[in-house]
Amino acid sequence: MVMAVVLSAVVVLASVFGGVEAKYMVYKTSQGIVPGMLNVHLVPHSHDDVGWLKTIDQYYVGSNNSIQAACVQNVLDSLVPALLADKNRKFVYVEQAFFQRWWREQSEAVQNVVKELVLSGQLELINGGMCMHDEAASHYIDMIDQTTLGHQFIKNEFGVIPRIGWQIDPFGHSAVQAYLLSAEVGFDSVFFGRIDYQDRAKRKDEKTLEVVWRGSKSLGSTAQIFAGAFPENYEPPPGFYFEVVESDSPIVQDDVNLFDYNVQDRVNDFVAAALSQANITRTNHIMWTMGTDFKYQYAHTWFRAMDKLIHYVNMDGRVNALYSTPSIYTDAKYATNESWPLKTEDYFPYADRLNAYWTGYFTSRPALKRYVRTMSGYYLAARQLEFFQGRSYSGPSTDLLGDALAIVQHHDAVTGTEKQHVADDYARRLSIGYVQAEALVASSLASLIESPLSLDREKQDTIFQQVPNISP
C-alpha cells in the first residue's frame, strides 16, 4: 500500500498547487526473479505468419494492406531502437524467413548492434526455423530441413543455437515434434498455444498445462522435454494489449497533470490477472505472452506500457513483474525442482469449441500437398547429385527449391488454410526452385556419365530432359 499513499500525496499536491511540473520519468525495469514471490515473466513477441491472408513478400514489405495491415519490416526496424533504449527490455523472434531478409538489408553497423543484442540476451532467436512449421501435413524430413536452414544461419551469424521450441500457432501438436524436432534438436523446452478446448479446461483444473512430454515410446526418457500449453492461446491477458492501433486496452496513464490517471487501477488489474493464472499453474512462475500476430510495428507503444507496469507493479509489491524470455522462464521452472506430470502421444485432434474440429486441413488443397511432397522427394535426390558433382556458387543449385520447400512447411501453407492467391505464390516459388534444381540435376547426371576429360560444365554434350508429373 506504500505506492497508493505516495501517489495520493502527489495527487493532493497537484490539486493544491494547480499541477506539478512535468519531468522525465525513469522507470525501474531491472527487476529480476524474486524468490518466494509470484514472478510474472513478460515475454514480448510477434507471431509473423510466413504467408496466410497475404503472401510472404506482401507481409514483409507491408503491401496489400486492404487485406491486413501488417508489415514485418516495420516490426524489425522499430524493435532495434526500442531495445537499445533500455538494456532490460527483451524480445523473442521466430520466423527466419523474415529475419534473414531483413538482416541482408541492414548495414554492417546495424548488424553489429543486433549481434550485441543477441549475445546479451535482449533479443533471443527461438524455434529458429525458416517458418513455424505445421505438425500434421508436413513430412518429418521437410520439418528437419526447414529447421536446419534456419539454425545454420543463426549459428553462422551469431554463434548461438536456439534453446526453445515455440510452436504457438499450429493446429494441434505431434509427438514427433516433442522428441525429434524439440528434444533431439537440443531444445530445453517447447511451448504452444493450440490444444483441444476440453483438454485445456481439464489441464487448468489439474494444473497440468505444463508437463514433461515423452513423445517416443522407443526412446523413452532420453528424448523427453519440458512442454507448456498457454492458458488461452498466445496473446496477453485481456486488457493488456498495447498495439498503437486496434487496441481497446487502457494504457497506463501516470501523469497526474492529465485526466484519466489510472495507475492503481492498472496495477490492480495486473495483479488480479496474475493471481488468476497462478491458480492454474505450478510453481511461483507464470508467463505472459506479450504480443500476437504481426504486432510491435511501432514497438515503443508496447515497451512503454510494460516499462510502466513493471515499475508500478513492483512498487505495489504484491507480485513481481519482470522482462523475460522463454529461456529465462524455463531455467526458473527447472530451478524449482518441481515434479511434472508426464504426457505421452499427440495433442491431436484440435478443437477450439464444440463441434469445431480443425481436421479438414489434413486434406485441404490436395494438389498443393502433392506438389510439396513431390518436390520434397526431388529435392532430396537433387542434393545428393549436387554433392557428387561439387557445389557451384555461380551455376544452378538447390538453394531456391530448398527455400521454397522450407517456407511452404508453414502452418498456413501446406495445411491449405491460406488464401488462394497465397497458395498460388507458394506453388510459383516451388516451380522456380524446381527449374533451377532441374538444371543442376541435368548437369550432374551428365558429368557422371561423361569421361573425366569432358567435365567442363560449359561444354557438356549430354543433355538430360526431365518430365516428372508435378503439375499443381
Image: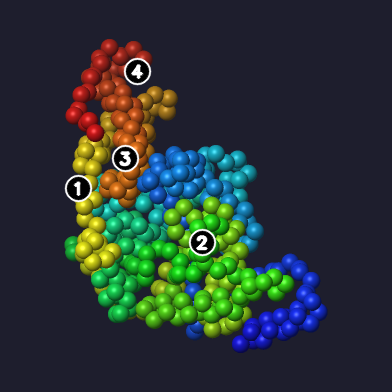
For label 1, count other residues whose C-alpha is less than 10 Å away and answer few (under 14), some (14-19) or many (20+): few
Q: Is residue 325 visible?
A: no
Foreground: disc 2 or disc 1: 2
Q: Earlier in the sequence, mark 1 or mark 4?
A: 1
Left or right side of 159 for 193: left
Q: Are marks 1 and 4 in contact (CB under 8 Å)?
A: no
Asked if the residues shown at circle 3 and circle 4 are in contact, with their CB atoms under 8 angstroms apart, the answer is no
Instruction: Point out which mark residue 420 bears.
Output: 3
Tell me the amino acid under the disc marked 1. Thr
Disc ID at residue 363: 1
Disc 2 versus disc 3: distance between alpha carbons? Answer: 29 Å
Q: Quadrant of residue 408?
A: top left
Residue 49 percent location from the top left of the image? 40, 49
Q: Residue at 22%, 30% (x, y): give it.
A: 471
The local secondary structure at tag 3 comes to helix
Query: Which residue type carries mark 4?
Result: Arg
Q: Secondary structure at mark 4?
A: helix
First along the sequence among labels 4 and 2: 2
Reading the chain from its start, which is encountered first: label 2 or label 3?
2
Instruction: Residue lying at the far right in this picture: please name it.
Output: 17
Circles 2 and 1: CB atoms closer than 8 Å: no
What residue appears at the point 56 percent right and 61 percent down from the top-left corner? 302
Q: Which mark is residue 457?
A: 4
Residue 393 x, y percent position in the rendering: 42, 28
Q: Nearer the viewer, residue 159 or 64?
A: 64
